[in-house]
Each structure stands twice: as structure tokens, then as C-alpha cells.
Amino acid sequence: MERTLAIIKPDAVKRGFVGGILVEIQSAGLSVCGLRMIRLAKEQAEAFYEVHQARPFYASLCAYMSSGPVVVMVLEGEGAIARWRDLMGATDPAKAAAGTIRKKFGVDVEQNAAHGSDAPETASREIPFFFRTLDIV
Ligand code: UDP
Ligand code: MG
């Protein structure tokens, strides 16, 4: 069993896609073992994405991620990290495969509906960023 950190980003929450994305997650056989709606302060978005701080899109990304509520989740299943990344699709919705969450629900390369940890080490940092052990069922 593996766990990954998933986020439904502000654009998708704002446009009413939380339910649709949860359906995709559960249809794919991933279990939701933690879930919360929060609004990130800009400093919290900056800390979460600090690995990208040298990138040209960092400031805009952090402003966007703190622009409205997000849904943070812990997903669990065999190979959950790769399976959630596959289900999300490519970073740029325009390049994402048909049927993926970013293709269906994303707006553009920044407002791309969802986040997923990209490796076990990333998940180990990202899950405790949002969830205490006792908040994961
Ligand atoms: N992003 C962006 N412009 C880019 C690349 C990425 O605004 O050219 C944003 C986008 O929201 C993306 C996030 O930064 O999801 C993190 O980028 P990363 O390369 O880690 O993509 P991901 O792992 O989310 O597919
Ligand atoms: Mg990434």
C-alpha cells in the first residue's frame, strides 16, 4: 500500500468540480484516507512549492494557489503515487491525454485542477505538510 498527497486546486474548487474529481478517484479504485478543505496563505503556498522557487512561474503559482479554497487529500492504494499522476494527466491540460482530470477540468498550465506527489520522497514530505497522523484514517 502506498499513499500520495492530492490537491484539488482553486480553479477546480471554484468551478464546482470537487464532486467530479472525487468520482474519478473512487472509480479508479484509490481510497481517500484523509480529506480537508483549506485556504492557503501565500506564505504556505510558497513553502509547499519551495522546490520550484527558482522557476519563472513560482510567484504566479503561489498567488494562484492561495487565491481560493483547495481540497487536500491523502489517497491510498497499490502504486497510488503513479496511479494518481496517470489519472491527473500531463501538467499542461492542452497536452494531457483524453479522459484525464487535467484534460477534463484544467484551464491552462498553471490552473490545471489538481496536484499529486511525484515520488515516494515527495509524498513523505507533502502528506505531513497538511495532515497529522491522527487525521489519516
Ligand atoms: N506550472 C506553471 N507553469 C509551468 C509549469 C508548472 O504554472 O510552466 C504550475 C502548475 O500548476 C503545476 C505546478 O506549477 O502543476 C507545479 O509544477 P510541476 O512541474 O511540479 O508540475 P506537476 O508535478 O504539478 O505536474
Ligand atoms: Mg510536481
Image (cartoon, rainbow, N blue to C red):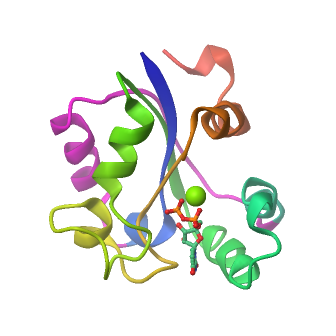
Count the labels in the image.
0
Residue 104 on image: x %, y %: 22, 69
User: Position of 98 compared to 11: left or right?
Assistant: left
Image height of 36 relative to 71, above or below:
above
Q: Nearer the viewer, residue 60 or 2?
A: 2
- Residue at image location 22% in from the left, 68% down from the top: 97
| Quarter residue 60 falls in | bottom right
Image height of 42 relative to 111, above or below:
above
Image height of 87 relative to 132, above or below:
below
Q: Is residue 33 magenta?
A: yes
- Residue at image location 81% in from the left, 70% down from the top: 53
Residue 83 on image: x %, y %: 33, 40
Q: Quadrant of the N terminus?
A: top left
User: Position of 30 compared to 37: left or right?
Assistant: left
Tell me the quadrant of ligand 2.
bottom right
Residue 99 on image: x %, y %: 15, 62
Q: Which residues are magenta?
A: 15-42
- Residue at image location 47% in from the left, 76% down from the top: 111
- Residue at image location 29% in from the left, 30% down from the top: 30
Image height of 102 relative to 72, above or below:
below
Q: Is residue 58 magenta?
A: no
